[in-house]
């Protein structure tokens, strides 16, 4: 089982951003997807650092891809998306706009924000040049099994969401800006203050979601700790870890220990909880009644 | 067509006296007969309920001292008029005029619900299924009662007359121009060219 | 301009046609369409009869097969496409890449529209769907302003259809898992959002809590309107603020923008609301038919009459005005 680090979903200061990739070069992960996923307005703050990050990671033997934006509407965003193909590394498509700009038949990766729910879509993407597909986090373990079996015949590697706040929705509206009484065009980068997203609570003051500019995430951190065995058995070949603040390198190492057999599901879950006090884990999309549920290692009802 | 909240009439309290004291069994029998007649004439109504046809619905006219328990029972429906709250899987409560207006398409269920003229409790999904099935059946209660003959029909007619006079509730489908040919022809459409 | 009107039941279809709808959209009573609500939608015979009714009166019928097929269960969706064609549908509305590919190869004579669920928000992506699958019309996601829609129309031959009235998704449609996170049921997989089966209203001490999946996302005082607890329109707290952080419980009403949308090159105006009653549908359709007829004849728009048909609350023009973002 490989470990893939997904694109940082949040808006970090450029130094913190670059530091993440410098650190990852030395960590036991196999591949890294970087670039701006959520909001095109963030990119100028760190895009000059991208080539160096790519070089560092490649020199460390990692596979590297650049992500497309999750939602492309503006002219500038279409241009950004078109230019991805010219950067010399693989492109991870997270909005089909990127596909329109890739040369026909050129290999590409598919990210979790493309709706790959079934064999027909998988086959079409494979024929078009998809080599790796990270499935939408919403899928059940049963769907993962069917798709992994189909992918084997198509020569496509299947990746599943392994750890991190789940991207649940993307919008044209910026909620951070709205919260601060600003429009998106004059957002003053309010999301920068919340490098793991801003807690969204219910009327009973329960933590529920996390706000991240135009994106909405789960408050829980999804973790496949307990489904690891079933995912291996299904033929999943990579798990995706989504960057967060705190000791992300330690999180990667804990997952590597799970893969190497040094930790079991409960051991990994305990470690993740110890590393980030107050974190709530979930694995309900894979095996529960609903996404927010946490099995705690108990078999699905 | 969807009036503001305040215009939904409530049943005048003194007139509800008979429902407080008289035995309800004859009324239940009459209304079961009516419901069975509707089921025969509109089989699609109960088919549309699908998996919710085995639920027990409590229809609660909040301005009357009784509730109506509806059990669709796969097209062999039973209707009972009860005092008290009644027990069921789903409760739809609102002024009689609102409930009847809903049946006749005079009100939109969502709109009544948002204005809280209508309150749904229990199995919301079943209540929604019932509302959608009733909406599709395009019932006209006055006409349904007319088709009913025999001794069971008489108390219903009396009740309908009374309700209509005292609340102004729409007891027939409103003539909104959609149901006559003239209205239809006037809006005849050129098929889009694509 | 063409008005495209919702029908959740055969009664609504007939009402919409009689009220002047040019085109009706509807779906089969199963998980293949994005309004898979209890008691709604069409069985095969109803679809055939409904299409015949519409055709006899000069209206077209589009069949929405716009959820994403379940892995291992695609046959249900494939059958829906074949049955829509057999019933005489004028087009199918699809979102899934695999289904579009299937329809293009197996049903080349059946016109294909791209659902809003595909979230095709720029000309590059729309043209990709047109070139690859022969898509003739795209329903634009509700994230675009009028000038952006005009720019898209300038760069594509594909007809555009835009929402003008009814419920408003604030998230890009087809890209939202909020509902399955809280309830296990999602628009993409099950054709439902914030499903009634997971809704609870709890009245206590004169306040009414609306809960979805056990989460209290609205609290109304006595006498206040009680919106349905749709996740993105719920009330939440973040930072120091509490309120409708994503969207107010408003509904879309772009009636007044019809002339601008026409200038922007829009082909069709879509009305949301397959879950609303037939009388509601008839009323909204009449209004919009009168409005597009007035615009076509160069007359001023009739005064807006639809606010009170909205969710008991104010209307919004949504993303069509840029400040919404």
Image (cartoon, rainbow, N blue to C red):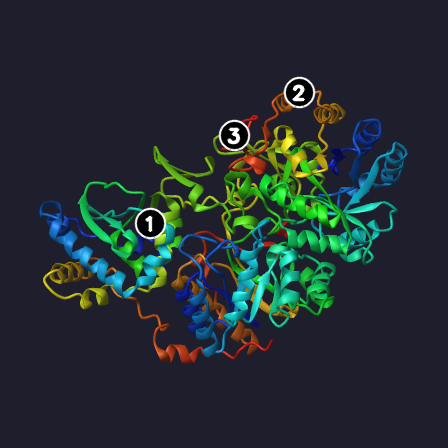
| Mark in front: 2 vs 3 | 2
Q: Is residue A155 left or right of residue B63?
A: right
Does residue A50 show up? yes
x, y percentage for residue A109? 76, 46
Judging by the rendered image, the residue that carries numbered circle 1 is B117
Q: Secondary structure at mark 3?
A: loop
- Say if C308 sits above or below A13 in the image: below
Q: Is residue A269 left or right of residue B134?
A: right
Judging by the rendered image, the residue that carries numbered circle 2 is A271
- Which residue occupies 71% across, 51% down? A95
x, y percentage for residue B78? 22, 52
Q: Chain of mark 2?
A: A
Judging by the rendered image, the residue that carries numbered circle 3 is A206
Q: Is residue C112 left or right of residue B134?
A: right
**How far is the residue under mark 3 from the one under mark 1?**
30 Å
- Which residue occupies 18% across, 52% down? B12
């Amino acid at each position: 089982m490989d470990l893939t680090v997904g694109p940082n979903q949040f808006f970090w200061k450029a130094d913190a951003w670059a530091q993440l990739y410098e650190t990852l070069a030395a960590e036991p992960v196999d591949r890294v997807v970087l670039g701006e996923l959520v909001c095109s307005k963030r990119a100028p703050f760190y895009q000059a650092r991208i080539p160096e990050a790519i070089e560092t990671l490649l020199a460390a033997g990692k596979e590297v891809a650049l992500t497309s934006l999750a939602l492309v509407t503006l002219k500038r965003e279409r241009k950004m998306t078109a230019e991805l193909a010219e950067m010399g590394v693989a492109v991870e498509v997270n909005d089909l706009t990127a596909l329109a700009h890739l040369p026909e038949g050129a290999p590409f990766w598919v990210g979790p924000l493309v709706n790959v729910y079934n064999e027909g879509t998988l086959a079409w993407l494979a024929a078009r040049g998809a080599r790796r597909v990270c499935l939408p986090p919403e899928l059940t373990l049963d769907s993962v099994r069917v798709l992994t079996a189909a992918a084997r015949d198509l020569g496509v590697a299947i990746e599943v969401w392994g750890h991190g706040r789940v991207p649940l929705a993307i919008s044209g509206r910026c909620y951070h800006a709205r919260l601060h009484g600003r429009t998106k065009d004059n957002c003053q980068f309010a999301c920068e203050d919340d490098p793991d997203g801003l807690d969204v609570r219910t009327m009973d003051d329960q933590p529920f979601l996390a706000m991240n500019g135009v994106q909405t995430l789960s408050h829980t951190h999804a973790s496949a700790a307990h489904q690891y065995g079933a995912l291996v058995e299904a033929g999943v070949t990579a798990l995706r870890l989504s960057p967060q603040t705190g000791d992300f390198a330690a999180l990667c190492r804990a997952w590597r220990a799970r893969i190497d057999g040094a930790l079991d599901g409960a051991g990994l879950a305990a470690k993740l909880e110890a590393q980030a006090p107050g974190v709530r884990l979930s694995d309900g999309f894979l095996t529960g009644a609903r996404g927010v549920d946490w099995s705690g290692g108990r078999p699905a009802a | 067509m969807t009036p503001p909240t305040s215009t939904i009439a409530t049943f005048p309290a003194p007139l509800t006296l008979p429902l407080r004291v008289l035995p309800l069994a004859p009324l239940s029998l009459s209304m079961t007969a009516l419901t069975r007649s509707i089921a025969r004439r509109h089989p699609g109504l109960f088919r549309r309920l699908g998996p919710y046809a085995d639920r027990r619905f409590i229809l609660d006219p909040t301005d009357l001292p009784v509730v109506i328990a509806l059990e669709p029972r796969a097209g062999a429906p039973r209707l009972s008029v009860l005092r008290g709250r009644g027990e069921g899987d789903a409760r739809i409560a609102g002024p009689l005029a609102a409930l009847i207006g809903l049946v006749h398409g005079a009100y939109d269920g969502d709109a009544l619900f948002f204005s809280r003229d209508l309150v749904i409790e229990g199995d919301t999904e079943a209540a929604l299924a019932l509302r959608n099935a009733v909406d599709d059946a395009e019932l006209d209660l006055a006409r349904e009662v007319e088709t009913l003959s025999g001794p069971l029909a008489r108390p219903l007619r009396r009740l309908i007359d009374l309700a209509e006079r005292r609340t102004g509730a729409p007891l027939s489908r409103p003539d909104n121009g959609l149901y006559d040919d003239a209205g239809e022809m006037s809006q005849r459409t050129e098929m889009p060219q694509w | 301009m063409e008005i495209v009107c919702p029908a959740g039941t055969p009664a609504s279809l007939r009402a919409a046609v009689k009220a002047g709808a040019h085109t009706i959209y509807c779906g089969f009573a199963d998980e293949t369409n994005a309004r898979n609500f209890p008691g709604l939608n069409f069985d095969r015979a109803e679809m055939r009869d409904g299409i015949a009714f519409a055709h006899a009166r000069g209206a077209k019928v589009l069949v929405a097969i716009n959820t994403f097929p379940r892995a291992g269960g695609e046959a249900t969706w494939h059958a829906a496409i074949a049955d829509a064609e057999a019933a005489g549908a004028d087009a199918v509305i699809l979102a899934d890449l695999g289904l579009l590919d299937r329809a293009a190869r197996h049903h080349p004579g059946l016109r294909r529209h791209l659902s809003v669920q595909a979230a095709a928000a720029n000309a590059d992506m729309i043209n990709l769907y047109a070139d690859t699958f022969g898509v003739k019309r795209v329903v634009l996601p509700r994230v675009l302003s009028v000038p952006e829609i005009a720019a898209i129309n300038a760069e594509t031959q594909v007809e555009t259809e835009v929402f003008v009235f009814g419920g408003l998704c604030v998230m890009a449609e087809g890209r939202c898992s909020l509902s399955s996170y809280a309830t296990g049921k999602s628009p993409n997989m099950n054709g439902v959002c914030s499903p009634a089966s997971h809704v609870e209203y709890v009245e206590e001490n004169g306040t009414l809590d609306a809960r979805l999946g056990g989460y209290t996302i609205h609290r109304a005082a006595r006498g206040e309107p009680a919106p349905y607890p749709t996740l993105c329109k719920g009330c939440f707290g973040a930072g120091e603020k509490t309120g409708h952080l994503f969207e107010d419980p408003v509904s879309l009403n772009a009636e007044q923008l019809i002339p601008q949308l026409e200038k922007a090159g829009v082909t069709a105006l879509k009305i949301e609301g397959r879950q609303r009653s037939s009388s509601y549908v008839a009323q909204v359709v009449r209004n919009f038919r009168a409005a597009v007829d007035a615009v076509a004849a160069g007359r001023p728009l009739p005064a807006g009459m639809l606010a009170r048909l909205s969710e008991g609350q104010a209307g919004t023009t949504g993303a069509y005005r840029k400040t919404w973002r």
